[in-house]
Structure formats: structure tokens, C-alpha cells
Image (cartoon, helix red, strand yellow):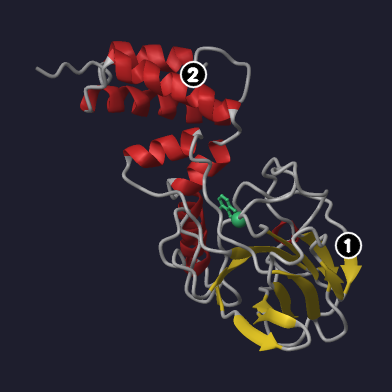
Amino acid sequence: MTVKIAHTPELQKFFAEAAGFTNDDGSSRLKNIVLRVLQDSAKIIEDLDISENEFWKAVDYLNRLGGRSEAGLLVAGLGIEHFLDLLQDAKDAQIGLTGGTPRTIEGPLYVAGAPLFEGECRMDDGSEEGVATQMLLEGQVFDPHGQPLAGATVDLWHANTRGTYSFFDPSQSAYNLRRRIITDAEGRYRVRSIVPSGYGCDPQGPTQECLNLLGRHGQRPAHVHFFISAPGHRHLTTQINLSGDQYLWDDFAYATREGLVGEVVFHESETSGRHAELTFDFQLQAAPDASAEQRSQRPRA
Ligand code: MBD
Ligand code: FE
């Protein structure tokens, strides 16, 4: 027999009290959100007949998730971060704000303050020389009219050959594979780097623990992240996902999108050996207001 009480006036009054509706302090926005969380949580518990053991297992899971700083990873893996992109796309479409390079998720591994260069630079610290394949990555940033955008900031980051990121992988040097480049007069950026490997969730971590119970893997294709910004233009958060990767269209974080696949071309030469080239251009939208020029206020490393 299923017993349901959450809908009763007594319980609704109780949730309103717990969410602070009977006092005049605090944030009314947060009160509204917390009330909804309480109501919907209670409904989930009732509707799915959540047992006491299941409930406390979930509480413990959240503690362990936070303890390992994997909350940002889980929301990516459950597709909620991708949902935010789809929702923003739909909001944009409704007001006719279209065009330019598609957005896709940031992921949890950005670090602010990467070394800044004009036009071009090298991204890797050379520590994987002999192991990594050299990659020349270049392209142009365009404005909404298709004109090259000089002075745009291309803030890019990617993993090493083991699929790990500097800062989060303390064995790498500071800001390895993280750079900011100001586009030149022709809107160009150009970097010498290495071909990244795809990312995989820590097999021992709480995110993979959840994915296992969903019968899912925790792998991403090889990819390069970008924040692109320029005065008067809308901030763009996106990624290039690399062609040929087995996870290209089987990304646990759902970041690969039409228009965001980079064609990596491998070359064999007697003088410089094997190296890869990847060309990828970006187009920004005009900023509807000044705040649109900035990236989100998401707390980051
Ligand atoms: C990554 O490198 C990433 O890009 C995302 C979205 C999630 C986990 C690791
Ligand atoms: Fe990534």
C-alpha cells in the first residue's frame, strides 16, 4: 500500500515553515527554490517508495561526492549541464538570437589565469616529448558579419596524453596545456600543442559509482575547451571534439554537437616525424547587453 501525505495542507504548511516562509529575513528567491526542492523531494520519496536505507545511502553519497569535489562531474555526466545548453539555445531561438559557433558545456576543469600571449604560443611543457603527438591547432575568430575579429581572447585548455588536466593532476606543471591567446589583426590564433587523449572519470570515484549503477561508462572523446570573448560580443563557451575518437558520439557528458567536430589530420614526415594538424574557426554573436560579454559566475579553481 502506498501512503501519500506530502500534498496535505499540514505537510505543505510544514515545508513552507522549513523553507523560511514564516519569517521576513533571508532571500525570497532561495526560499522559493528550497520550498520546491522540499516538495519535490517528498514527492519523489512517496512516489518511488524510497526506503530509509535508500535515503541515507543518498545522503552519504552526497557527502562523498562533495568530499571528492565531483559534484561538477556528476552534473555533466547526468546530462544536466548539457540540458542547460539546450535550454539556453531554446531561449535564444525564441528571441531570434541565432548564428555563430554552437555553445557546449564548460565541464568542471577550467582554471582561470592561464598565461597570456599575442597570436600564437606553445601550450605543452615538453614533458610528454616522445610520447605525445605534436599538434598544430589554429584558426580564426569571426564576427557576426563574417569579418575577422582582431583582439579577441581565446582561452583554451585540454588534457594530456593520459586524459588528465594540469592543476587537477598535480603531477603536471602549472598551467600545462592551458593558455590565453589574443587574436592577431586577421583574427587568428595558433598554438603548438600535443594531441590530447579523452577523459575518463576516476573509476574509484563517486561519479563512476553512480554511472556503473546506470550501466554507463564515464568516458569523453579527446577534446579541446574554449572560452572566446571580445568586446561587444557574446561570450562563447565551447569545445572541439576530435574526429576519429571512439567516444566522439558516445560522450558521457554529451558535449559533442553538430558543428563542433574537429578534423584532426595526421602527417608523417621524415624530418619531424608524426604530427597532427587541426584547423578550427569560430564565429561570435553580437552581445545583446554588456553582461553577455562575460562568462558565467560559476565558481572555478
Ligand atoms: C572533462 O574533461 C570534461 O570536459 C567534462 C565535461 C567532464 C569531465 C572532464
Ligand atoms: Fe574536458
Residue 4: quarter of image: top left
> What secondary structure is found at the residue carrying circle 2?
loop
Seen in the picture, residue 228 relative to 43 is either above or below; the reply is: below
Residue nearer the viewer, 170 or 179: 170
Residue at mark 1: 116
Residue nearer the viewer, 102 or 239: 239
Residue 242 in percent (x, y) is at 56, 71
Specify whether 54 is left or right of 111.
Answer: left
Mark 2: amino acid: Ala
Task: Locate the C terminus by quadrant.
Answer: top right
Please name the residue shown 54% across and 43% down the image. Answer: 73
Residue 284 in percent (x, y) is at 68, 74
| Numbered badge on residue 268 | none
Specify whether 43 is left or right of 271.
Answer: left
Seen in the picture, residue 74 relative to 87 is either above or below; the reply is: above
Quadrant field for ligand 2:
bottom right
Seen in the picture, residue 214 relative to 276 is either above or below; the reply is: above
For the residue with label 1, is its CB less than 8 Å from the closest atom of ligand 2? no
Residue at mark 2: 19
Q: Are marks 2 and 1 in contact (CB under 8 Å)?
A: no
Residue nearer the viewer, 136 or 286: 136
Residue 59: quarter of image: top left
